[in-house]
């Protein structure tokens, strides 16, 4: 692997992502731009992207561009449109097809850049040195061989890289899951030790909450990378959670800019911001179902807990919000996985009950670490709103509660008023 390759060594929402940069290649003046599919879905949007790139190289900076597939579901080359063509196909074939959307986008934008006088070269994810771990349709980036990108930059070209994809060390093409182009951009930026990564989005800001759920949400002008990571993992649709993990580990400044205006809207700083509110925002994930399994009297609780979690994990089902108490094991699973959980527990002769649909609502802020009374305020806020907490979990930067799905938006609004608007 070339010097400067990015090697993730730990990954996951609980542990975070650490990276080791092999060697120290400082690419001062190198910037990474990432354009989303909506930004590139029309000729006008692509023209605006070309203008942003022209401005990006006007001061002599070297530029690497990462792109998503053009458009949304229903548009010819959008990821969901392609996915609808291969329902029921093997995962490896879905990966082969889905990567085409980003490749088309890269070729089209590279041509538009050349037409505007900016030398450019389209690269697939694997041509750009993206090596994945081989998990079909949901890979992690294992490392980035920076050689191909550095070669293109050395030839005076602007590499336009197809995001969301890569190839394993054995040559198998895989994709990175929803929002994976953000991850590609951050991984390349980290591997190059770029000056900054700019995410061009069709938004006017990152907000303290989803404005659709909380109309009083406030624009965030600066956010720490750790808070960005936590908000992403708790369900905020800001950047892909894995991209946020890399942002924490790499320490690279990130700027979110408006594709429409070209103006910066939110700056992501590679450190914890200690000024201002200690709660950065509130967020909620997708619908889930809470399962409570009860041990028979003949089975020791520790054996039962291990058996239940082992059964569900062995079925390939992702769990969250784990709790154990005496002869009970409690956890949540995505609503779409609920039938599989029921079948798995029943096949294992496990007695269980369930509640749902539910949602996990969270307050996020690395600044709350060590502060007293936050949980008391959190629970009192939901009580005063007439909302029951079915389960809770916390970390150094989050406090979360499981609530009935019907109460999700009211819970978010109440927590936002208490912790953000005051």
Image: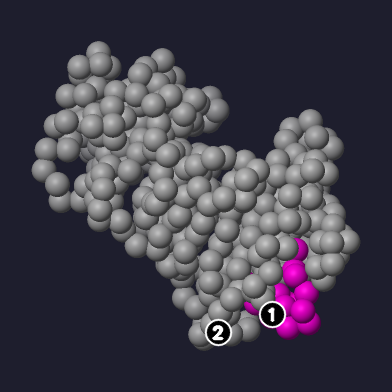
User: Is residue 158 in the magenta section?
Assistant: yes
Q: Nearer the viewer, residue 335 or 384?
A: 384
The residue shown at (25%, 56%) is 274
Q: Is residue 14 above or below residue 23?
A: above
Q: Nearer the viewer, residue 224 or 325?
A: 224
Earlier in the chain: of badge 1 and badge 2, it is 2
* Residue contact at pointers 1 and 2, CB within 8 angstroms: yes
Q: Secondary structure at mark 2?
A: loop
Q: Is residue 63 above or below residue 257?
A: below
Quadrant of the image containing the N terminus: bottom right
Residue designated by label 2: 25
The residue shown at (59%, 76%) is 29
Q: Circle 1: is it few (<14), some (14-19), or many (20+) Cα within 10 Å?
A: some
Residue designated by label 1: 150
Span colored in magenta: 142-160
Q: Position of residue 224 (x, y in %)?
A: 37, 55
């Amino acid at each position: 692997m070339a010097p400067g390759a990015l090697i993730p060594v730990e990954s996951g929402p609980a542990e975070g992502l650490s990276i080791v940069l092999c060697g120290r290649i400082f690419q001062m003046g190198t910037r990474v731009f990432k354009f989303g599919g909506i930004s590139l879905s029309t000729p006008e949007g692509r023209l605006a992207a070309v203008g942003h790139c022209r401005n990006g190289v006007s001061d002599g900076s070297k530029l690497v561009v990462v792109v998503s597939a053009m458009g949304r579901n229903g548009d010819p080359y959008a990821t969901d449109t392609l996915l609808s063509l291969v329902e029921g196909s093997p995962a490896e074939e879905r990966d082969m097809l889905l990567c085409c959307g980003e490749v088309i986008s890269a070729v089209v934008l590279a041509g538009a850049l050349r037409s505007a006088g900016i030398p450019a070269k389209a690269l697939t994810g694997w041509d750009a040195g993206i090596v994945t771990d081989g998990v079909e349709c949901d890979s992690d980036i294992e490392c980035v061989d920076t050689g191909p990108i550095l070669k293109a930059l050395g030839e005076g070209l602007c590499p336009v890289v197809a995001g969301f994809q890569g190839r394993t060390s054995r040559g198998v093409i895989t994709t990175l899951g929803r929002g994976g182009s953000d991850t590609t951009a951050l991984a390349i930026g980290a591997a190059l030790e770029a000056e900054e990564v700019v995410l061009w989005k069709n938004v006017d800001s990152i907000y303290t909450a989803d404005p659709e759920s909380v109309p009083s949400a406030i624009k965030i002008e600066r956010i720490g990378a750790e808070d960005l990571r936590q908000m992403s993992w708790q369900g905020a649709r800001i950047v892909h959670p894995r991209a946020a993990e890399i942002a924490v580990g790499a320490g690279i400044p990130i700027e979110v800019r408006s594709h429409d205006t070209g103006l910066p809207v939110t700056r992501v700083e590679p450190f914890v911001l200690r000024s201002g509110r200690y709660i950065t925002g509130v967020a909620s994930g997708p619908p889930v179902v809470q399962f409570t399994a009860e041990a028979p009297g003949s089975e020791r609780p520790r054996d039962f807990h291990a058996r239940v979690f082992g059964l569900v994990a062995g079925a390939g089902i992702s769990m969250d919000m784990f709790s154990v108490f005496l002869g009970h094991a409690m956890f949540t699973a995505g609503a779409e996985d609920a039938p599989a959980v029921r079948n798995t527990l029943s096949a294992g002769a496990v007695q269980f009950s369930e509640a749902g649909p539910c949602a996990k609502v969270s307050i996020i802020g690395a600044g709350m670490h060590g502060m007293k009374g936050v949980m008391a305020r959190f629970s009192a806020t939901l009580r005063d709103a007439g909302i029951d907490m079915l389960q809770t979990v916390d970390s150094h930067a989050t406090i979360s509660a499981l609530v009935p799905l019907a109460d999700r938006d009211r819970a978010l609004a109440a927590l936002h008023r208490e912790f953000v608007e005051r």
